[in-house]
Amino acid sequence: MPVVIGLALLAFWLYCLFDVITTPEEHIRNLPKLLWVLIVVLLVTVGGLLWMLLGRPLQQEAYTPGASGSGGGVPGSPKRRPPAPRGPEDDPEFLRSLERRLRGEE
């Protein structure tokens, strides 16, 4: 049982550390990013709890990596899904050029 608790605390600490490192500086609350990294590294579990309660961006201003559109990752803006990737078979110009090549026109 103590091993499971230890692994859970380690996972929580690693999550908090990764979260601090990957959150943009302008979204972090109350203290500078470097100070939050030091708090999480040195205080381990307590530092992780402090980060989650006092430093992490609030839900409505949470950073969304990879979001595209006019408001991707900007606090208070609507979050849009990036457009689905298109394959060559979805591109009409590619299909026309393929047919020309098959007929020997190029």
Image (cartoon, grey):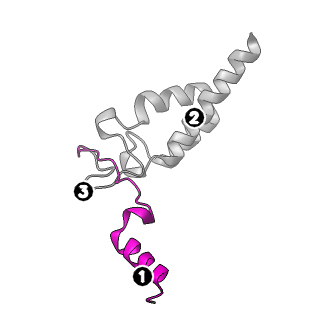
Q: Is residue 32 above or below residue 86?
A: above
In the picture, measured across the screen, residue 34 lies left or right of residue 30, that is: right
Which residue position is annotated with label 3?
Answer: 70
- Nearer-the-camera pick, 21 or 91: 91
Q: Position of residue 69 (x, y in %)?
A: 28, 55
Considering depth in this image, is 45 or 72 the residue closer to the camera?
72
Q: Residue 42 occupies which quadrant of the picture?
A: top right
Q: Which residue is mark 1?
A: 100
- Could you tell me if the residues under marks 2 and 1 are in contact, i.e. CB atoms within 8 Å? no
The label on residue 15 is 2
Q: Secondary structure at mark 2?
A: helix
Q: Mark 3, mark 1: which one is toward the viewer?
A: 1
Residues rendered magenta in the picture: 76-105
Q: Is residue 91 magenta?
A: yes
Q: Is residue 105 left or right of residue 46?
A: left
| C-alpha separation, residue under disc 2 versus residue under disc 1 | 54 Å
Residue at horizontal 48%, vertical 33%?
51
**Given the current orientation, which residue lies at the most extreme bottom position?**
106
CA separation in Å, label 2 and label 3: 29 Å
* Residue 53 at x, y percent in the picture: 42, 27
| Upstream in sequence: badge 2 or badge 3 | 2
The percent position of residue 33, horizontal first and vertical second, equals 48, 47
| First in sequence: mark 2 vs mark 1 | 2
Amino acid type at image mark 3:
Ser
Question: Could you say which is closer to the camera, residue 45 or residue 22?
Answer: 22
Q: Amino acid at mark 2?
A: Tyr
| Number of other residues with Cα within 10 Å of mark 2, as a class: few under 14, some 14 to 19, many 20 or more | few
Name the residue located 70 percent from the left edge and 23 percent from the top edge: 7
Q: Earlier in the sequence, mark 3 or mark 1?
A: 3
Does 99 appear in magenta?
Answer: yes
